[in-house]
Amino acid sequence: MAKPQDRQLVEQWRSIQTTYFHTAGALERALESKFSIGLTEFEILDLVAESTDAACRMKQLGERTPMTQSAMSKVVDRLDKAGLISRQSCADDRRSLFLELTDAGRALHRQAAIEHRALLRENLGKY
């Protein structure tokens, strides 16, 4: 028989999941329909835009997202091909890559971030 505190933890976990799935679904639908990007693409654009350096190191990006290195690389590849992010090799360390928003990436991010934040307020305010 489950302990009462275990039942409470399970219910808390399910509440967190419900909030996440509802919010992520709303974000995914809105970003795709209005800006033709998915939530994971937006999250990478958002993290690069928030970087305090002129360019964001790929390694720093990997530390700030729950995505695997492989998944993140695929998203960055798509953003690069779409002309939203540029990648440059680091002169000091050829294994390192710097990411920077292009002008098109900055413009898209600026518009999509307004929608993203509004949906966060709307959806997270319910829970």
Image (tube, grey):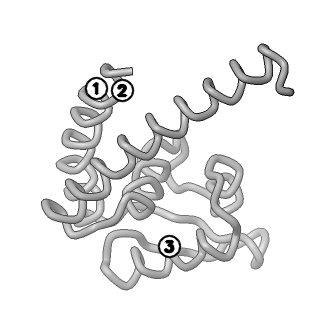
Q: Secondary structure at mark 3?
A: helix
Q: Residue at x 21, y 69 (%)?
A: 36
Q: Where does the image place residue 7, in percent across and percent down from the top left?
A: 72, 23
Is residue 69 toward the left or the right of residue 2 in the image?
left
Along the line of sight, the residue nearer the viewer: 94 or 3? 3
Tag 1–tag 2 contact (CB < 8 Å): yes
Amino acid at pointer 3: Val
In this view, the mark in front (2 or 3): 2
Amino acid at pointer 1: Arg
Residue farthest along the bottom direction in this orientation = 81
Is residue 69 toward the left or the right of residue 85 in the image?
right
Quarter of the image that includes the N terminus: top right
Is residue 110 toward the left or the right of residue 56 in the image?
left
Q: Residue at x 67, y 57 (%)?
A: 62
Q: Secondary structure at mark 2?
A: helix
Q: Which mark is residue 44?
A: none
Residue that carries the numbered disc 2 in the rendered image: 124
Residue that carries the numbered disc 1 in the rendered image: 121
Q: Vertical placement of 74 versus 39: above or below?
A: below
Ranked by sequence position, the earlier of labels 3 and 1 is: 3
What is the CA distance from the residue labelled 3 to the residue labelled 1? Answer: 27 Å
In this view, the mark in front (1 or 2): 2
Q: Where does the image place residue 34, in percent across and percent down from the top left?
A: 13, 60
Q: Residue at x 31, y 80 (%)?
A: 82
Q: Vertical placement of 35 versus 118: above or below?
A: below
Tag 3–tag 1 contact (CB < 8 Å): no
Name the quadrant containing residue 81: bottom left
Q: Which mark is residue 76?
A: 3
Amino acid at pointer 2: Leu
